[in-house]
Amino acid sequence: MSPTVFKYKNYRFLFFSREESRIHIHVSSPEGEAKFWITPQVRLAKNFGFSQNQITELKKVVEEHKNDIKNAWSKHFRS
């Protein structure tokens, strides 16, 4: 199961169940996929297909939603 945390433009921000325990978010769109670590600070972990401009924009969006992502992570992985 891959719950969507939120959407922004044509990007889907989601978790993959049964993955590593360190808080992170995946970003998916028809153009590519990326993974960002949330703690201890927002940082790009992987990028497949997004341009540097897209990564910069996505990182900003992740930073703006950091608390929402943490809350969604806690709810999803504690159940």
Image (cartoon, helix red, strand yellow):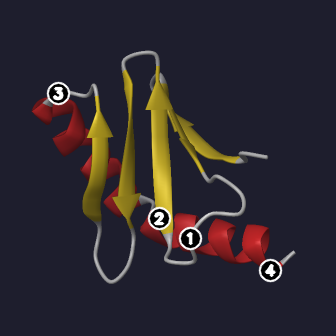
Q: Nearer the viewer, residue 10 or 64?
A: 10
Which residue is pictured at 50% across the width and 73% down the height?
A: 23
Which residue is pictured at 49% across the width and 77% down the height?
A: 22
Q: Nearer the viewer, residue 38 or 6?
A: 38
Residue 68 disc label = none
Amino acid type at image mark 2: His
Element type at marker 4? Answer: helix
Which residue is pictured at 64% across the width and 52% down the height?
A: 16
Q: Are marks 1 and 2 in contact (CB under 8 Å)?
A: yes
> In 3D space, how far apart are the residues under numbered discs 3 and 2 (Cα atoms)?
20 Å
Tell me if residue 24 comes above or below residue 57 in the rendering: below
Residue where numbered disc 1 is placed: 20
Residue 24 disc label = 2
> In 3D space, how far apart are the residues under numbered discs 1 and 4 (Cα atoms)?
14 Å
> In 3D space, how far apart are the residues under numbered discs 1 and 2 (Cα atoms)?
9 Å
Tell me if residue 45 comes above or below residue 75 in the rendering: above
Quadrant occupied by the C terminus: bottom right
Quadrant assignment, res 62: bottom left
Residue where numbered disc 3 is placed: 51
Choose the circle earlier in sequence order: 3 or 2. 2
